[in-house]
Image: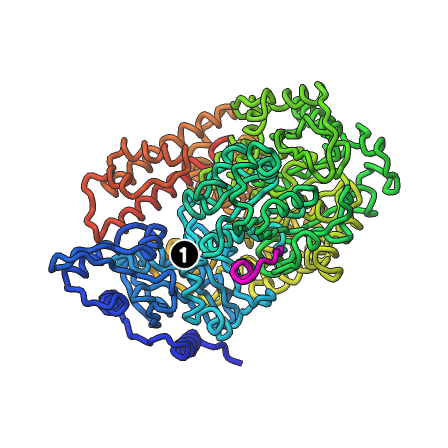
Amino acid sequence: MTKQPEAILEYNLIQQLVGLDYQLVKIPDGNALVSNLKAQLEGFNKTVFSTKEFDTILNHLAKGNVFEKAKTLRDRFNITRDNGDSFYVRFFNNEYWTSNLFQVTNQITQEGTYKNRYDVTLLVNGLPLVQIELKRRGLEIKEAFNQINRYQRHSFWSNHGLFQYVQLFVISNGVNTKYLANNKLQSVKQTFFWADVNNKNITDLTEFANSFLKPNHLGKMIAQYVVHNETHKILMVLRPYQFYATEKLVNQVATSNDNGYIWHTTGSGKTLTSFKASQIIMNLPNVHKVVFVVDRKDLDYQTMLEFNSFKKDSVDVTDNTQSLVRQLKDNSKLVLTTIQKLNNAISKANYEKSLTHLQDKKVVFIFDECHRSQFGDTHKEITKYFKNSQLFGFTGTPIFKDNASKNHLGKRTTKDLFGSCMHKYVITDAIKDQNVLRFGIEYVGKYKQKGNTLIDIEVEDINTAEVFADEKRLEKIADYMIAYHNQKTFNKDYSALFAVSNIDTLIKYYDIFKRKKEAGEHDLRIATIFSYGTNEDDEDAQDYIPGDQLPQAAEPNLAYKTSHTREKLDAYISDYNKMYNTSFSTKDSQQFENYFKDISKRLKEREKTTFQDKDRLDIVIVVNMMLTGFDAKKVNTLYVDKNLKYHGLIQAYSRTNRILGEQKSQGNILCFRNLKKATDEAITLFSNKDAIEDIILPPYETIAEKFDDALKNLLEIVPTFQSVDTLPSETEELLFIEAFRRLLRAKNVLESYTDFDWEDLGIDEQTFEDYKSKYLDLHDKVKNDREKHKTSILDDIDFELELIHRDQINVAYILQLLAKLKHSKSADAKAQKKAIIDMLSGDIQLRSKRELIEKFIEENLPHINDVDAIQDEFERFWHEEKVLALSKMCDEEQLDQKQFQALIESYTYSGREPLRDEVFKCLDNRPSILKAREIGERILDKMKEFVQVFVEGMTA
């Protein structure tokens, strides 16, 4: 069967869209796009614009970036007409989205830095709001995603920036079809399949168009389900299960007073769903207020930040019960609070009196993580006080009969409290959709007969507190973590949590790690946090920030304060202060809360491009804190030395499985207790028994087989690494790239297992490295061709360079090897020199420095007699080359060297890419508007390359 070419795929889609009531229009270029825009805006606004009036509109539309233009699209623009009248121009009808005018066109050509031709464009009122990029069947749709990114850089900004009004992209190869928001920060991991209400994915392009691209549905998605993230200044779009849950909630509030709950698995974006539902519900005519309730002070703050990032100033945090009462009384439509403050407001007489007018009003309560907070008297108090209330719960792990705890009200389930489940999206759905990762679980102890997970830490059957707390056992576990932490976290590129059973054990662990660090056995940065005012001997106890405890909680904790634990915590916070130059303590609850926030922020901000290694935190030791409701994409490992079960287990494991790029292929769980039975039971409860294999990565041996299959495929294409040089055309090069990329992906997963060993594989490490060098050579070739404006079928290939990592090799390490080379006899020197050059070729960061280091080896090293002087001589050489390179770049681009050097230093320090205007200030002459973007991008690229060569990886 021949593969369907893109042209046929495109033709069939356009015919289908015409059948769905799109008007087909021919728009060959940017001028035709502008002419059509004028005609459509006139039709939509039921008027005719003069040339002068339309120029004013066009100038208004040209302003701003993608984020700002998304707001312009939804606003009205006031113009003064030629006759002096005032007129409000609308660009999109958000309330009645079917009244917008829908058109389809294809193959629009625009010229920016390069000339690009786009596949299928959906125009709404003349503006391009949806861009569809197609690839022929058989190609990965990732290539279509990369093509979109290329268009963003090369031409979307040209012709008044009209293509920056695109809200959604659709990418498809006919068989697989996904949609995504117009957000240049996202990776291909933030692209989504559309699905039906039962989470069955709609992947075929024809079915997708029938379901998603119908004007009524597409109009609604753009009007209500594209969210503006104010924090990152990007657009986000809801995934199908978020859309269906929101629609069901809105419909239930509009048509009945029934309660209900939403079961969406941990990590699937419940906050965005609940925000969107709250936002739509609060505008329904029958609703007086929406109250969003969280159960912990830290989540109150976290949720406020997230809600306000989705819509500026949408909520104000209620610092205390008094401010909550004030917001309940005033005209705030959306109130965010903790369950503790809500309980105070309705149970304390001095507050309660001022709220009586709300008792008969329709107040909708939305409870976040309702599996944790709703099982004491508070639920009863709320429903008794607000007689016309409607309650909805969100949970990733509902309470069923099997995992219900008993309190004085009996065993109660989520269904008992909230009624029926309105929409379900369980962990198997999320893994299938690649919205969360699978877990790679290893049980460390005497549970396996061989391999690196076999260590003598306890006999499996003995389950006594004394054995678990034995210092020798804790020492062995600490040694094990030190030995394998780099392997699990890609050389500390990710962080880990360590969950332990109680505070006493936590203290022992922290002291062991501290002692070993002082003895030079590791250089891990370790912190801890625990609440010092609560009895936590019980492993199921909740862990709160002081001030969060609820008097009516289902399982009241005995209050105790021992000076010992508080003194210990203060000492540990003091270590933290020294490490990061901070000044936290436990003097009061605010100081302690700030310490907690600082730890959270340190883990969360690792994913930012501006993150500095000096802020890195490697491991946080906890009892219960951070094991629920805490999200940080750069946490990929959980060490466990405590008993977990049911919702507690799934919640804790789920701290590790947030999606982030290709490198993070699973959440690593290292259990120092045999939790296999508990894990299987939890997965069975929250999905089904057959789902265990879908949720947990298979054993090491199975992944090794996948690696062997990928290797066999590679060797069929290129039997030796030298064969890559003789591939006849780009078509064969593409086959090699895809085959080696598959091998890289398998190796990336394999390496996360502690049993990883090259001896088990069908290729030795050196041969693998040789193939990798050829792979990187092709990457460099594609990059150079792009700079020379050559088009290539390899243009949109993603080489997934993040998968290419090795041990911490930097220039300091290379200098040590050069010292050895200087010492070695001439017979060995040749082989050592080749090994150094090969190493430079195989490392992404050092590859850019290869030419200069080779020059140093050839020209300078032979003249250095004292081995101890190599470092000084190298630094002098490097500085000279750096000055020459900077001078050359400034001459070529006519830049003021002093100003440009200051700009480079600022970029190196902050990680923030300079604005184009900052670059232009360094130029002798500011370029014309037509050339500005091209010149700005070229200089920025050169600057990044300069920093990559001369700055990155240059420290020991």
Q: In this view, which residue lies farthest toward the left?
A: 83
The answer to whether 108 appears left or right of 798 in the picture is left
**Which of these two is toward me, 550 or 190?**
550
Tell me where residue 586 appears, x and y as whole percent. Answer: 60, 22
In the image, what residue type sits under mark 1?
Answer: Asn
Q: Which of 337 and 158 is in front in this view?
A: 337
Q: Is residue 807 visible?
A: no
From the viewer's perspective, is 937 left or right of 407? left
Towards the viewer: 307 or 714: 307
Whether residue 716 is situated above or below residue 360 in the rendered picture = below
| Residue 254 spot, x, y in % from top left | 51, 60
Q: Residue at x 54, y 51 (%)?
A: 364
Which residue is denoted by mark 1 in the rendering? 182
Q: Height in image: 224 above or below 801?
A: below
Instruction: Choose between 319 and 637: the one closer to the eye.
Output: 319
| Residue 36 among those drawn in magenta | no
User: Horizontally, is 521 left or right of 730 in the view?
Assistant: right
Image position of 843 (left or right of 750) = left
Q: Tell me what residue is drawn at x 38 percent, y 65 percent.
A: 97
Q: What stretch is highlighted in magenta?
A: 249-262
